[in-house]
């Protein structure tokens, strides 16, 4: 057993459901055994109850739950920074040429390690990962995630039209390759499988039918929806019988409680009602939406419809893997929306970067906050002495104020240590 002591904050509540302040909890210590949180309370109480157990002091900064990224592309870790293009041009010129390179399994192995180590170094311990178009590359990702004991849900990306030919599969090969991957990796340790058509723009009704067959195996589902106006117009032309973009998935039974749709920047009210009715979640990707000029996410309309929202970095369109940066950008976007926006508090930002993701992925019985019984997946954000964040934290008036200053200023350089199920996974040597 180990007792971790410091400024520990998490969001066991839901800040969108009532007074945001009620969603936050602060504590002084956690007792961890075999990677699981066994008790929480003051350091004095835990040391009195468990005398002789070693205490790890995390003095300075904040200890928060491991971040949870609900939309990030593994094959794009080497393609960050392609600015100046809207979605469909960026895919054609920046993302897809890089994704083609993962046909080489050796290349995919290097990329998988860079991607997962990059996430850990940014404090991300769980993720719904948009996979590769190549099955062997998926074996590399799952194998590397298993070694790192990360909570990874991912799947082979499926497309049978419009994209460059080397990225296409047929409905038949998609079904066979996906079924093999599900057998090998789904529910193996902390790994799970997600059926992943790239978007209905690049998937025929036959391919979406295959997705529905695969979803019957009890796995997860993810795809893109309503990211960009040109994309939406193209989808409307490809599916003249669909009521709206989301309907291209709904007609195949792909909008479910186990479905996470990325973006949804331009939904109509019927789409929001459909998402709510089926209990599907939306991954909001703020820096990507800004970088590609996709639009300003209508968070308030999602909340008013009762749709669950979490955060995604959407690397490589997003500007890095560090989820607090996404949370800050989400805050900025809501400010820019004025009366149509939803003013986010620091408690919302922590919730969106942690527990909201766990709920979207059906993992909130295991991770997302520091409740007793959950896995000790944690990030210690401790800034360098005398840095602006260090100065601000020393002048913070309490947990919420410390969070505000952290979300404003923190960078991956402030990730001092990361734990995955109680084991050190990344981080610098203690300063
Ligand atoms: Zn994406």
Image: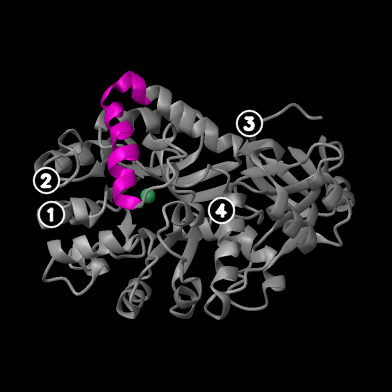
- Element assignment for label 1: loop
Q: Residue at x 89, y 55 (%)?
A: 395
Say which of 126 and 292 sits in front: 292
Q: Earlier in the sequence, mark 1 or mark 3?
A: 1
Q: Quadrant of residue 172?
A: top left
Q: Residues within 10 Å of mark 1 (few under 14, many from 20)?
A: many
- Element assignment for label 4: helix
Question: Where residue 87 appears, x then y in whole percent?
Answer: 34, 51
- Element assignment for label 3: strand
Q: How is the image coloured?
A: one colour
Residue placed under numbered mark 3 in the picture: 426
Q: Main secondary structure of the magenta part?
A: helix
Of circles 2 and 1, the one toward us is: 1
Between the residue at mark 3 and the residue at mark 2, the CA separation in whole angstroms equals: 40 Å
Residue 171 numbered tag: 2
Rendered view: 371 above or below 380 = below
Q: Residues within 10 Å of mark 3 (few under 14, many from 20)?
A: many
Residue placed under numbered mark 1 in the picture: 204
Q: Earlier in the sequence, mark 2 or mark 1?
A: 2
Q: Residues within 10 Å of mark 2 (few under 14, many from 20)?
A: many
Taking the magenta stretch, the answer to whether it contains residue 381 is: no
Total marks in image: 4
Q: Residue at x 73, y 59 (%)?
A: 404
Q: Is residue 39 left or right of residue 151?
A: right
| Magenta residues (range) | 87-108
Q: Is residue 263 left or right of residue 389?
A: left
């Amino acid at each position: 057993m180990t007792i971790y002591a410091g400024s520990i904050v998490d969001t066991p509540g839901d800040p969108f459901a009532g007074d945001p302040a009620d969603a936050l909890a602060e504590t002084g210590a956690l007792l961890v055994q075999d990677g699981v949180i066994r008790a929480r309370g003051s350091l004095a109480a835990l040391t009195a109850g468990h005398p002789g157990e070693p205490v790890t002091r995390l003095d300075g900064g904040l200890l928060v739950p491991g971040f949870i990224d609900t939309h990030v592309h593994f094959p794009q870790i080497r393609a960050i920074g392609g600015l100046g293009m809207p979605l469909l041009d960026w895919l054609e010129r920046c993302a897809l040429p890089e994704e083609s390179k993962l046909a080489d399994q050796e290349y995919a192995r290097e990329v998988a390690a860079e991607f997962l180590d990059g996430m850990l170094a940014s404090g991300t311990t769980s993720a719904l990962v948009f996979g590769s178009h190549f099955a062997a590359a998926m074996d590399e990702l799952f194998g590397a995630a298993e070694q790192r004991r990360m909570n990874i849900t991912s799947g082979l990306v499926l497309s049978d039209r419009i994209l460059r030919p080397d990225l296409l599969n047929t409905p038949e090969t998609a079904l066979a390759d996906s079924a093999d991957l599900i057998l090998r990796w789904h529910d193996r340790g902390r790994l799970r499988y997600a059926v992943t058509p790239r978007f209905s723009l690049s998937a025929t009704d036959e391919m979406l039918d295959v997705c529905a067959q695969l979803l019957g195996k009890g796995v997860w589902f993810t795809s893109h929806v309503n990211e960009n106006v040109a994309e939406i117009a193209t989808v409307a032309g490809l599916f003249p019988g669909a009521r709206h973009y989301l309907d291209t998935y709904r007609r195949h039974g792909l909008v479910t409680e186990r479905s996470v749709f990325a973006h949804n920047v331009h939904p109509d009210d019927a789409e929001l009602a459909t998402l709510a009715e089926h209990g599907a979640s939306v991954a909001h990707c703020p820096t990507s939406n800004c970088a590609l000029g996709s639009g300003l996410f209508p968070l308030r309309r999602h909340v008013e419809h009762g749709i669950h929202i979490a955060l995604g970095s959407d690397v490589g369109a997003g500007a890095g893997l560090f989820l607090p940066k996404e949370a800050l950008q989400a805050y900025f976007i809501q400010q820019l929306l004025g009366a149509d926006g939803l003013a986010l508090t620091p408690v919302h930002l922590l919730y969106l970067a942690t527990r909201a993701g766990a709920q979207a992925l059906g993992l909130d019985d295991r991770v997302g906050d520091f409740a007793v019984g959950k896995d000790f997946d944690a990030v210690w954000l401790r800034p360098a002495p005398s840095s602006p964040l260090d100065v601000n934290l020393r002048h913070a008036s309490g947990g919420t104020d410390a969070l505000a200053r952290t979300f404003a200023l923190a960078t991956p350089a402030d990730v001092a240590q990361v734990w995955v199920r109680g084991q050190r996974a990344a981080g610098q040597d203690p300063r």
